[in-house]
Image (cartoon, helix red, strand yellow):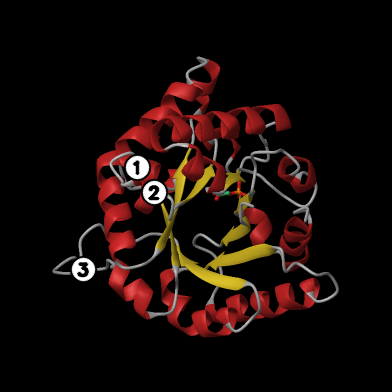
Amino acid sequence: MRKKIVVGNWKMNMTFNEGKQLVDDITNELASHSSDHVLKIIAPPFIHLAALSEKIKSLKGFEVAAQNCHHLSNGAYTGEVSAAMIASTGANYVIIGHSERRLYFGENNNLLAQKVNIALANKLTPIFCIGENLVERNANQHLEAVLKQLKEALFHLSPADFSRLIIAYEPVWAIGTGVTATVHQAQGMHNYIRSEINKKYGKEVSTTISILYGGSCNAKNAKELFACIDVDGGLIGGASLIANDFAAVINSVVK
Ligand code: PGA
């Protein structure tokens, strides 16, 4: 059985008090439903990690992620945050390769491969994002685009290390746009990703790794996306900032 996972990526939103309140509201919203079959991960901004980690991890079935980490272990890199620092706050996960990092901060696959290595070395689980942009999708090159990201950023890993990852397929054209991939597009890509992992690492790894969908996933469309055989949950941006929407997305994961 693959782990079912829903991750809330707060991005650059939430003051400390707003974040605390949101966690309380999510807990209240979830109280009436059992969501024990879903691992719930919240990714607040770095500045709140230490303080919110304790609060979030005290909730049953909740874990904490950072949204990024530096690719080196330490040193004179003003303003940056290392994987070891993240781990020291109690967070066990880190989002790596989000398309906003690739687009606005120039992060490429070579750099992301180093981030994955340092995260794993510090016992963090990378939630690694891949996905094509609109030009690639329209040119029917979405499969090649995603395969290139997998090969260049992840396929250097040993099978044991690769199996520690969570993959998130996030078509760039669907992130924050209100345009979601269709069930057909999502299932097609998830199946393709799993088949390429199977080719590289074999059945044991490819059938046990969780592949999440992200990109305008919300309370309205989560159920049908999560019903796809190769979709193991979601990486949620906008809808993770509203407690009852996020709870509804979590409750859309079938047992
Ligand atoms: P969105 O963001 O749900 O707001 O589209 C998803 C993400 O960027 O992880």
- Answer with the quarter of the image where residue 186 lies: top right
Against 189, residue 127 (above or below) is below
Name the residue type under label 3. Thr
Residue 85: give x, y in percent of width and height.
31, 75
Label 3 Cα neighbours within 10 Å, binned few <14 / some 14-19 / many ≥20 = few
**Residue at x 51% of width, y 30% of height:** 195
Residue 52: give x, y in percent of width and height.
52, 80
Name the residue type under label 1. Leu
- Label 1: which secondary element: loop
Q: Earlier in the sequence, mark 2 or mark 1?
A: 1
- Label 2: which secondary element: helix
Residue 35: give x, y in percent of width and height.
75, 67
Q: Please state if 165 lies on the left or on the right of 123 as rendered.
A: right
Q: Nearer the viewer, mark 2 or mark 3?
A: 2
- The residue indicated by pointer 1 is 154
- The residue indicated by pointer 3 is 78
Q: If the image is split into quadrants, where does the C terminus sit?
A: bottom right
- The residue indicated by pointer 2 is 162
